[in-house]
Amino acid sequence: MSYQISGKKVGPIGFGMMNLTIRNPPTPYEDCFAIMKNALAGGANFWNAGELYGPAGATSLELLRAYFEKYPEDREKVVISVKSCFNFAKYQPLVDAASVRENIEKCLKIADGKYFIDVFEPARMNPSQVPVEETVGAVAEYVKAGKIGGIGLSEVDGGIIQQAVKVHPIAAVEVELSLFSTDVIENGTAAACKQHNIPLVAYSPLSRGILSGQIRKYEDMPENDSRRNYPRYFPENFAKNIKLVEKLDRLAQKHGNTTAQVAIGWVSSLSDRENMPTVIPIPGSTTLPRTEENTKLVKFSQSELQDLDKLLEDITGSVVGARSPNCSSHQPAGNSITHRSQGPLIPPGRIKALRVRWARETIRDAPGWPEITVTPDNHVAIMNMLRQRESAGRADVLEAEFANWSTRDEGLEAGGERLPTYGEASEGIML
């Protein structure tokens, strides 16, 4: 089967670039170049980058520019998708027309003519504040002018897709999709993509590594691994989820491939389903062996697909914990930037004072940060973002305060305004 995005041929498996630049310390450029070359050699010529991925001046856009400065002969071989239009400092989408234009211009300036942006994606939509038509229309101006190749949408549902296509054709829709996260198959997203012949780009096809076969117990993750902040990786949840992975291990052994290859292969195989659009998984990696493993396309016989479908039946409803710190287990992000708390990510006995202390002292004092209330939904993401903004010391202090701070009734007052306590209806800002 031939795959296309923005009118260009792409392989059945793409390459997610986020981890190359977002980790601390980031992967050295020469190592990145070797990994990118290897992905391309393996047929993964659709590269998913982001102006958000990494600190200012060292995002995946700068990495791409450096790569094509060194390997200009690869420019026409690669199809590039760029995610932008999100303000991490305020935790909000920048999707009004003026902001969209500003962000596209910024990305084009970084690219500096060394590569072409085939797909430009606003990282999140905000339809309750900015009409979908305004956001898509602003990107469409640049497509019509030939400055970018096409429009991508990220973490949206079928309703937003239906609104968007009335303004301009959509080149791709990026969502989380794996054996552990199949929401988009049931919530209308896949159906809308099928209806309008839009490729579905599946990020985290290994559910952030738990389906890779490389993690066997909670302790396998380094202490500073951000996945420890994800509900699916919490110790009590991980122990249950890994038992589901062990079932996949047995199928992979029977098939003669690795666990990761079978998990990615299942996502890719959805393209062959009658009711599904083209689905292109974009696993990421930071080492050559993982890149070689993840870009090998695995095909299944009918009986093997039946085995995988049976496994999916066992998994559905059995996976424990939300897929990210800011999502419920069965709800996609993206329809709104606010989202009701699904339960405590930190012990209820400490949450009241911690929230007030962060809102009044820590966040307000951090350069470039607004005064915001930290909630059960966003506290982990904000702590991680502090680290990414070179505020690791501040984040460490927060962790220490979290460990030692006790709830006090008088801690509930902040600037004369009583903040909601845990157990009350509260809204959190969501990525």
Image (tube, rainbow, N blue to C red):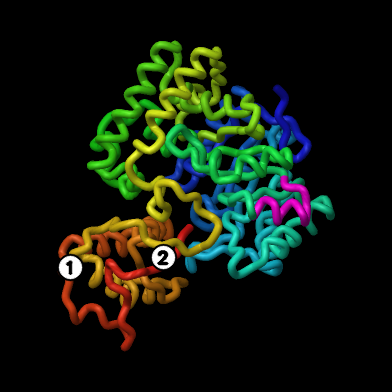
Magenta segment boundaries in residue numbering:
160-170
In the image, residue 428 lies in the stretch drawn in magenta: no
Assess disc 2: are there few (<14), some (14-19) or many (≥20) residues with their C-alpha within 10 Å of its C-alpha: some
- The residue that appears at 76% across and 46% down in the rendered structure is 149
- The residue that appears at 36% across and 26% down in the rendered structure is 213
Reply above or below: 423 against 83. below
- The residue that appears at 60% across and 45% down in the rendered structure is 189
Residue type at mark 2: give it.
Gly
Q: Position of residue 183 (x, y in %)?
A: 50, 42
**Is 240 left, or right, of 191 in this rendering?**
left
Reply above or below: 401 against 237. below
Q: Position of residue 209 (x, y in %)?
A: 40, 35
Residue type at mark 1: give it.
Trp
Residue 405 circle label: 1
Can residue 390 be seen here?
no
Q: Which residue is mark 2?
A: 428
Closer to viewer: mark 1 or mark 2? 2
Can residue 173 be seen here?
yes
**Closer to the N terminus: mark 1 or mark 2?**
1
